[in-house]
Structure formats: C-alpha cells, structure tokens
C-alpha cells in the first residue's frame, strides 16, 4: 500500500471540496472492541478531531463541519451525556490556542441553550478567540438536528410574514437557506460517515441535497489522515452533474 506522501501526490489541489461534513461514528464500538469504557472511545475520538482538523487546514479545505452531539444524543444515559459535555468543554478550552495559531475559526451550530452553562461559555470563548482567523472554518454541530434547524427556520419565516417583513409568495430556496444555521456558508461538497453505518441521522438534510456521500467502515477513533485522504481521492474521481448530463458538464 502506498504511504501517505505518495497518496497525497494523487490529490488535485484544484479540485478539493470546499466544504467537508463528517458524521463521526464508532467511538463506542471502538472502546467495546478493546474491552474499554465508552468514555475511552470518546476521548480517543477527540484525537481524531484534532488530527482531521489539522490535516484539513494544511491541505486547504475551507469548511469542515463535524457532527459532535445530536439532539437525539440527549437520550443517552445521563452519565455518558455528562461525560461528553465535560469532554467537549475541556477540549475546546485546551485546543483553542492551537486553533488560533493555525488560523482556524470556530463556529457553533445547534440548540446551544440546552448545553451546560460552563460548556456554553467555553464554546463562546473559543468562538470569540478565533473570530479573527481567516483559514479553515470549523463548524461544530452540538445539540443539533436538521429537523430542529428546519423547524426553527420555518418558525422564523412565519414570524417575519406575520409582521409583514416578507411576502410569503416571495419565499424561495435562498430565503429559507438564509434562515438556517449555515446561512452564508456553502453547502457541503462531500459528506463522510465513519463506522460502517450508511444513513444520514438527521444531519444537514437541506444542505446535503447535492453532496457526494462517502461511507467507510473505519471507526472514528481509527480515522486517520490516510483514511481521510482515501475519501478525498474518491471524491475527486466522481462526476458532479447537479442534474445536467455528462456532456454538459464536460463542455464547461
């Protein structure tokens, strides 16, 4: 098998996805396979977050969105939820200086009012500390679900229509997209899900309408730069037609 440096030469810098979204799955199974606590899997998953964030920044990815904690995850055992909240807060506090040094800007997407106050403060401090950064945009989805996001957008549009701020007949795709958490951010070009499952799990349902989907059996804690590179190379081998024919795409 080729080493990372050799595979990296196969990547076309001009055809990198501008926006990569990742469903990080497999922490619990990684721990169970090693007869370890689930918390160990989540902690190891943080190392993958750091690794993939750094690699994305190094190769020139502009947006990286990570599904870190869904609204459905609140239904997990309370002890695991508490551990995850503590881990998220600790990680942001620890990693923010490195993110600043690497010119990475943090964005938080989700129902953040549900997060513990200490965690929310750590996240907001990270957002503020990196607000000036102009490199990779790191979007962390916390207490997030796409149905929550779409419901919130519909509610906002209804409120504006009731106040006469907008004409309901003039609402179009761009109007709705502007009310989403990702307003102003390009849709993902590539969606990766680790861990072997092949479903979307209520993640960016509007935004991934034309994303390329890549499913890998690699568990998130084992998802290293080489596995990420395989996904990027696979993406570059695909033809993105957006409803057009192959001949139309090639004629551009």
Image (cartoon, rainbow, N blue to C red):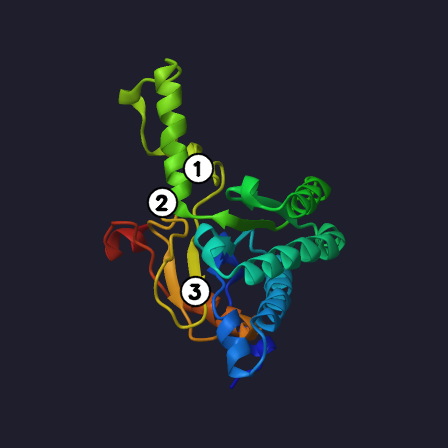
Instruction: Look at the image and tell me whether residue 17 can be seen.
Output: no
Q: Residues within 10 Å of mark 3 (few under 14, many from 20)?
A: many
Q: Is residue 177 left or right of residue 32?
A: left
Q: Residues within 10 Å of mark 2 (few under 14, many from 20)?
A: some
Query: Which of these two is toward me, 56 or 149?
Result: 149
Within the image, what quadrant is residue 240 found in? bottom left
Q: Residue 206's mark?
A: 2
First reached walking from the N terminus: tag 1 or tag 3 = 1
Query: Which of these two is toward me, 193 or 12?
Result: 193
> Whole-Å distance between the Cαs marked 2 and 3?
17 Å
* Mark 1, residue position: 180
Q: Residue 193's mark?
A: 3
Number of residue marks: 3
Q: Is residue 154 above or below residue 126?
A: above
- Circles 1 and 3: CB distance less than 8 Å? no
Within the image, what quadrant is residue 171 found in? top left
Residue 113: % across, % down: 56, 39
Secondary structure under tag 1 reads loop
Within the image, what quadrant is residue 46 found in? bottom right
First reached walking from the N terminus: tag 1 or tag 2 = 1
Residue 68: % across, % down: 53, 56
Q: Is residue 206 left or right of residue 9?
A: left
> Whole-Å distance between the Cαs marked 1 and 2?
9 Å
Which residue does the image show at 41% across and 49% down from the upper left?
204
Residue 101: % across, % down: 75, 53
> Whole-Å distance between the Cαs marked 1 and 3?
22 Å
Q: Is residue 87 above or below residue 154?
A: below
Which residue does the image show at 41% across and 35% down from the upper left?
152
- Circles 1 and 2: CB distance less than 8 Å? yes
Secondary structure under tag 2 reads loop
Residue 110: % across, % down: 51, 44
Q: Residue furthest front?
A: 78
């Amino acid at each position: 098998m080729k080493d990372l440096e050799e595979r990296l030469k196969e990547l076309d810098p001009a055809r990198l996805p501008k926006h990569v979204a990742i469903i990080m799955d497999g922490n619990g199974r990684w721990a169970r396979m090693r007869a370890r606590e689930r918390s160990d899997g989540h902690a190891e998953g943080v190392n993958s977050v750091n690794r993939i964030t750094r690699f994305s920044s190094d190769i020139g990815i502009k947006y990286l969105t990570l599904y870190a904690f869904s609204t459905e995850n609140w239904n997990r055992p309370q002890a695991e939820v508490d551990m995850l909240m503590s881990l998220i807060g600790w990680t942001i506090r620890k990693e923010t200086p490195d993110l600043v040094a690497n010119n990475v800007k943090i964005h938080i997407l989700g129902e953040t009012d549900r997060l513990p106050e200490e965690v929310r403060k750590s996240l907001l401090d990270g957002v503020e500390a990196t607000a000036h950064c102009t490199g990779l945009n790191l979007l962390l989805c916390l207490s997030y679900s796409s149905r929550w996001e779409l419901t919130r957008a519909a509610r906002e549009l209804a409120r504006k229509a009731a106040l006469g701020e907008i004409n309901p007949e003039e609402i179009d795709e761009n109007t709705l997209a502007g009310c989403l958490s990702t307003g102003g951010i390009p849709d993902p070009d590539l969606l990766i899900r680790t861990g072997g499952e092949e479903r979307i799990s209520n993640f960016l349902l509007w935004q991934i309408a034309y994303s390329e989907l890549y499913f890998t059996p690699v568990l998130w804690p084992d998802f290293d730069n080489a596995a990420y590179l395989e996904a990027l190379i696979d993406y570059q081998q695909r033809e993105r037609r957006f409803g057009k024919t192959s001949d139309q795409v090639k004629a551009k």
